[in-house]
């Protein structure tokens, strides 16, 4: 299951390579996981504004049940005994 995603806007240019592999320019909006958001805020609390949170849609771990001949309704005249 995927966790909560945080949308953050850079209020100034952010250059911490331990948090992001590239420079994040002022005004850019990034969507990151909670851990990365916490690291960015810890690195420079004044450089970020939280602009939203996104809850990813749930993913199904079980396949949809398939109809079988036993569960399918019998239709008279389809070649099977009614």
Image (cartoon, grey):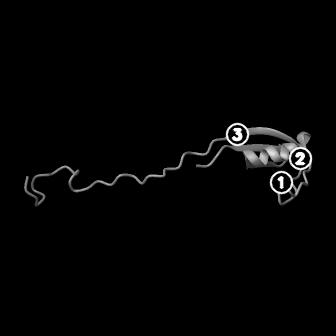
Disc 1 to disc 3, C-alpha distance: 19 Å
The residue depicted at 48 percent of the width and 52 percent of the height is 61
Q: Position of residue 3 (x, y in %)?
A: 64, 46
Q: Does residue 10 show up?
A: no
Q: Nearer the viewer, residue 41 or 67?
A: 41
Instruction: Bin the neighbour count of mark 1 within 10 Å (Cα to Cα): few under 14, some 14-19, many 20 and up.
Output: some
Asked whether the beta carbons under mark 1 and mark 2 sit within 8 Å of each other, the answer is yes
Identify the residue at image location x=26%, y=56%: 68
- Please name which of the two marks, 2 or 3, marks the residue nearer to the observer: 2
Q: Look at the numbered discs 1 and 3 and tell me whether their residues touch, using CB distance below 8 Å.
A: no
Dot 2 falls on a residue whose secondary structure is: helix
Name the residue rendered at 85%, 56% in the picture.
18
* Mark seen at residue 19: 1
Residue 59 locus on image (x, y percent): 53, 49
What numbered label is drawn on residue 53?
3
- Circle nearer the N terminus (1, 3): 1
Label 1: element kind: loop
Q: Nearer the viewer, residue 13 or 42?
A: 42
Q: Could you tell whether 42 is left or right of 72 in the image? A: right
Question: Looking at the rendered structure, which numbered label has been put on residue 59?
Answer: none
Residue 43's mark? Answer: 2
Q: Earlier in the sequence, mark 1 or mark 2?
A: 1
Q: Is residue 25 left or right of residue 8?
A: right
Residue 20 location in percent, x, y? 83, 56
């Amino acid at each position: 299951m995927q966790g909560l995603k945080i949308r953050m806007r850079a209020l100034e240019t952010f250059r911490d390579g331990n948090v992001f592999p590239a420079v994040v320019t002022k005004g850019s909006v990034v969507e990151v996981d909670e851990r990365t958001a916490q690291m960015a805020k810890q690195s420079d609390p004044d450089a970020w504004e939280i602009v939203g949170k996104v809850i990813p849609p749930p993913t199904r771990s079980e396949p949809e049940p398939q109809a079988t001949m036993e569960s399918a309704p019998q239709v008279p005249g389809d070649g099977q005994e009614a």
